[in-house]
Amino acid sequence: MNRITKRILTFALAAIVSLPVFAQEPAKKQTPPEGSAPKPFKVPARQRFTLPNGMRVSLVPYGTMPKVMISARVRVGGLNEPADKFSVGDFIVQLMKEGTKTRTAEQIAQEASSMGGALETGEGADQSSVSMDVLSEFGPKAVALIADVLQNPLFPEKDFERIRTDKLRDIAIERSRPQTMANEKFRQVLYGDHPYSRVLPTADDLNGMKLDDVKKFYDDNYGALRTDLYVAGKFDPVAVKAAITKAFAGWKKGPEPVVNPPKITGKKSLSFIDKPGAAQSTVFMGLPALDPSSNDYVPMIVTNSLLGGSFGSRITSNIRENKGYTYSPSSQLSIRYRDGYWMEAADVTTSATGPAIKEIFNEINRLRSEAPSKAELDGIKNYLAGVFVLQNSSRQGLIGQLAFVDLHGLGDEYLNTYVQKVYATTPEIVMGETKKYIDPDRIAIVVVGDPDKAKSQLADYQAQ
């Protein structure tokens, strides 16, 4: 900008600033028009086939962007881990990226990068995954890389020791967090000795782990019968199918998936974990509920969202907006295979520990005895329907949904009718779901906080 232009701008700004300001009446706020209901979601048609070794494949042409995501989901996770070998499966998924019998870790990373992506691995309670999102032209090549990582992990000793050291440091940090402390205790109260009770390994678990334990767990649990492979995006289906057949046809079948749902009913209890001097209390409270195979599951999603599972929910409005006890409370339906629980979590001011819990129970009891208004429920349903459509607007999101329905045996019809089921949920159904699944007499409460200031507020919640 030259000197003349700067002077012109300076004079112009000065003139604007010097203009007289006349009082004006504030404009009346206009009510925005109501948004239209989200369109029903229709899952893209997928081509399915099964290899002779039992591995299931889903090909889903989706979108116009020249990218494709390939994701293998294996039915092995925390559920399969022996009590004295907790987190062995996490060692496996981390070590998979550290080399195969024909590729070094550097070669894996460079090859994935050359395709416009990166190799990602992870482990959950029921499944482990190996995934890549790459440029469309490299779809067949990405399939071959994922197949090599899944079938031929090298498990290098030096990387095993490094991962152990990293995990020891990470769990020491994580265990100092009150949210982790509350979550561990809550899961123990809910599940007892079942594998779903475990949240983090102990230092003894990690120090006792041997590389031979990792190799044995892999050999005993990984195989084609437990694996679903998903391909979504823009790709050549003929070339990708040929690449899958070539890369995975020789993989061992391996064992059938383990089915071991917990048998829990839930009971009223109060657990307090001392954290002297804490400025706030971390509260977890909940009970066993239902899993996605239930016909009540979608209505229960609506119920949870209205009660505590959205920013506009009743519990959030009560203890955050109205009372100011907490900043970000939330409830959730936490799901595993043939299992699920409902839980409310909140970090509340220490002096409000008891009052916050009381208000949560008040909102539960109110919804158990009085149906919400149609207007309140319509807002929640529009929110959920919109979120669902957004969740399916990416390759990763679509594969996540397909893997979800396959794990729980729901079929694609679950996705195709989800929005309709959300809108079919009436105020009376919401009240009925709350009465059926959120019984205050079966709720377990866990509090992490200052014992001198918070514990005395909880006398009313001791189990009789």
Image: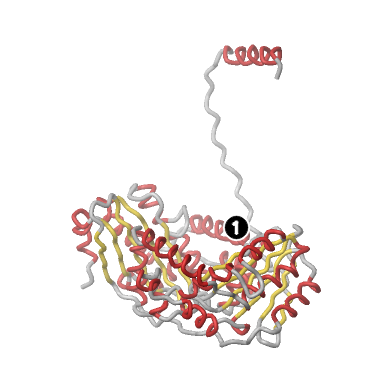
Residue 298 in picture, x, y percent from top left: 53, 69
Q: Quadrant of the C terminus?
A: bottom left
Could you tell me if residue 80 is visible in this image? no
Residue 164 in picture, x, y percent from top left: 44, 67
Label 1 Cα neighbours within 10 Å, binned few <14 / some 14-19 / many ≥20? some
- Image: 169 above or below 220: above
Residue closest to the far front: 158
As shown in the figure, which amino acid type bears the numbered disc 1?
A: Gly
Q: Is residue 401 left or right of residue 144?
A: left
Residue 348 in picture, x, y percent from top left: 32, 53
Q: Nearer the viewer, residue 173 or 6?
A: 173
Which residue corresponds to mark 1? 386
Q: Nearer the viewer, residue 139 or 38?
A: 139
Residue 58 in picture, x, y percent from top left: 69, 75
Q: Residue at x 52, y 27 (%)?
A: 26
Q: Quadrant of the N terminus?
A: top right
Q: Residue at x 43, y 67 (%)?
A: 431
Q: Which of the 4 quarters of the picture holds residue 368? A: bottom left
